Amino acid sequence: MEGGEREEKRRVVVIGGGVAGALLAKNVQFNSDLVLIDPKEYFEIPWADLRAMVEPPFAEKILIKHTDYLTNAAIVTSRAIGVTETEVLTDGGRSVPYDFLVIATGHADPVARSRNDRIEQFREENEKIKSSSSILIIGGGPTGVELAGEIATDYPGKKVTLVHKGSRLLEYIGPKASVKALKWLKEKNVEVLFQQTVDLESISDGQKEFKTSAGKSVTADCHFVCIGRPLASSWLKETILGKSLDEHGRLMVDEKLRVNGQKNIFAIGDITNIKELKQGYLAQAHATLVAKNLKLIMKGVKETNLAAYKAGSAIAIVSLGRKSAVAQFPFATISGRVPGMIKSKDLFAARTRKTMGVDP
Ligand SMILES: Cc1cc2nc3c(=O)[nH]c(=O)nc-3n(C[C@H](O)[C@H](O)[C@H](O)COP(=O)(O)OP(=O)(O)OC[C@H]3O[C@@H](n4cnc5c(N)ncnc54)[C@H](O)[C@@H]3O)c2cc1C
């Protein structure tokens, strides 16, 4: 405040209430006139999802209503469909003006709008697992491997088959992690079929016989599609930011995480083109840095005094059921109970809730 006059707060709009956007919004809510735009009414801890499929009450922990951690913000429950130099357009027909914009739309995931409906989805998925004696998982990335691990641990009597189009599991990290994850899954009697796909277009509801591209027949009472989710950036193509997308659909940013060519538009999380593993803890680091810089900018601090982002190292932990995991660190890849103690017991749910300022 200056001269007894109320300081006018700047309008910060955050698009995307996932790992990065939710944390940034939480961190700037008392320093700005904040609006969060997200198609769902809650923040979901994505790396804990697969536990909620085998243990539905766990969903209560991993779905946090935006209103629980944003007590000083406006929340627009819509999808952003456009951006101009001054405002964001939503599919609900609103235009939301901004002074500073942060894009954090990560991956496109068509999940339920309400928290209760999302909890119900987890219950339905669990019923599907419980009532099946054989299960087909399509995709051997982190989602497919972690789901296979959860089912093999909690329902050891079920026959699980994982079909993967690549020649190794977990291709986003090193081959040592792939070998260790495969060994663990095989020990749990999960059958893994490499270098073949299942034609998703041809699958119908209730189908129990599946043919892979290699001609192998798989019998399964139910199936789960765990192929990588596309980036949620196609909506930007026809906007002022279209030219800032690289050939993979990622937003190109500078070291302050500002979208190339823009003064007041930032991007954080998986949607950025930063050369590092796309991981939630790094998305949180982006959010923390941009929140800090935004506060400084709004105070009038000089550009040269803003913090710069340094790409993170290639650390990733993939859980294998409730006790084991495979972890890649910069100098070693380990598996078993030790990395399991770091992640697999509660999949960072309590820690993430604490970070978001809600009861662990
Ligand atoms: C199985 C699995 C396990 C993982 N384990 C770990 C782990 O152990 N540790 C770790 O650090 N990372 C982990 N990750 C990675 C982590 O989940 C991602 O890096 C992280 O979610 C990225 O955060 P984000 O905010 O960029 O995007 P997201 O979390 O994808 O959030 C994007 C948000 O944007 C919203 N959105 C999308 N489009 C629009 C639109 N047009 N308008 C408005 N809102 C929109 C979405 O609804 C969502 O809320 C794991 C990922 C998977 C799949």
Image (tube, grey):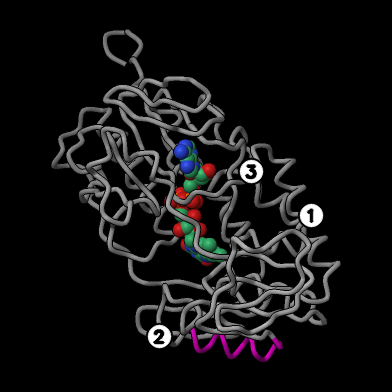
By secondary structure, the bulk of the magenta-drawn segment is best described as helix
- Camera-near label (2 vs 1) is 1
- Circles 2 and 1 in contact, beta carbons < 8 Å: no
* Residue name at image x 62 percent, y 46 percent: 111
Q: Is residue 237 above or below residue 89?
A: below
What residue range appears in magenta?
177-189
Q: Position of residue 64 (x, y in %)?
A: 63, 43
Dot 2 corresponds to which residue? 332
Q: Locate residue 162 relative to residue 23 in the image: left or right.
A: right
Which amino acid is tagged 3?
A: Ile
Which amino acid is tagged 2?
A: Ala
What secondary structure is marked by label 3?
A: strand
Dot 3 corresponds to which residue? 64
* Residue name at image x 67 percent, y 65 percent: 224
Q: CA distance from mark 3 to mark 2?
A: 34 Å
What secondary structure is marked by label 1?
A: helix
Residue 268 included in the magenta stretch of the image = no
Pointer 3 or 2: first along the chain = 3
Q: Residues within 10 Å of mark 2 (few under 14, many from 20)?
A: few
Dot 1 corresponds to which residue? 124
Residue 280 appears in the figure: no
Q: Position of residue 85 (x, y in %)?
A: 26, 25
What secondary structure is marked by label 2?
A: loop
Q: Residues within 10 Å of mark 1 (few under 14, many from 20)?
A: some
